[in-house]
Image (spheres, helix red, strand yellow):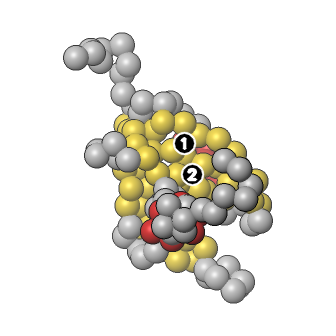
Amino acid sequence: MSKDKKVDPVEDLFEDDSTIPESNWFEFSKIGDVITGELVEAFDKEGKFGTQRVYVVRIKDGREYNVGLKHTTHKVQIQQLKRAEPGDMIGFRFDKEVDTGKVNPAKSISVRIRHVDKKTETSA
């Protein structure tokens, strides 16, 4: 496309706010929020609030969500989830808020793992 050609704003995806993709980060907004599904992968991500362990979870309908746990506040859960492998079923539940003496309370998250025996699974 040449530089001097005018772009129709209706046709330009970056001028149309309705084309902004929905976030794929799962947000624990209220106590009792739960996400469960198949573990796709896990990796560390640096952010403005420190390092997070990110778990990519595929839910029943095929959509994938990122669930982030901070290394500083969810060390036990991260350690527990080291036993999970891609293909296993995992779950996260927001159980309660914990006063940390800081501006925002910490979120107490429970985790669960159901190991899936990959040897006995069959392809359709």
Q: What's the residue at 34%, 42% (across, down)?
A: 62
User: Marks 1 and 2, Cα distance to the nearest angstrom?
Assistant: 6 Å
Residue at left 46%, top 74%? Answer: 29
Q: Is residue 79 left or right of residue 26?
A: right
**Residue on which the image places disc 2:** 77
Q: Is residue 18 above or below residue 105?
A: above
Left or right of 44: which side holds 19? left
- Residues marked 1 and 2 touching at CB (< 8 Å): yes
Residue 34, x across and y down, in percent: 37, 61
Image location (x, y in percent) of residue 93: 42, 61
- As drawn, which residue projects farthest toward the front? 4
Residue type, numbered disc 1: Leu
Quadrant of the rendered structure where residue 4 is?
A: bottom right
- Asked if residue 48 is positioned above or below residue 45 in the image, the reply reads below
Residues 17 and 63: in front is: 17
Residue furthest left in the image = 124
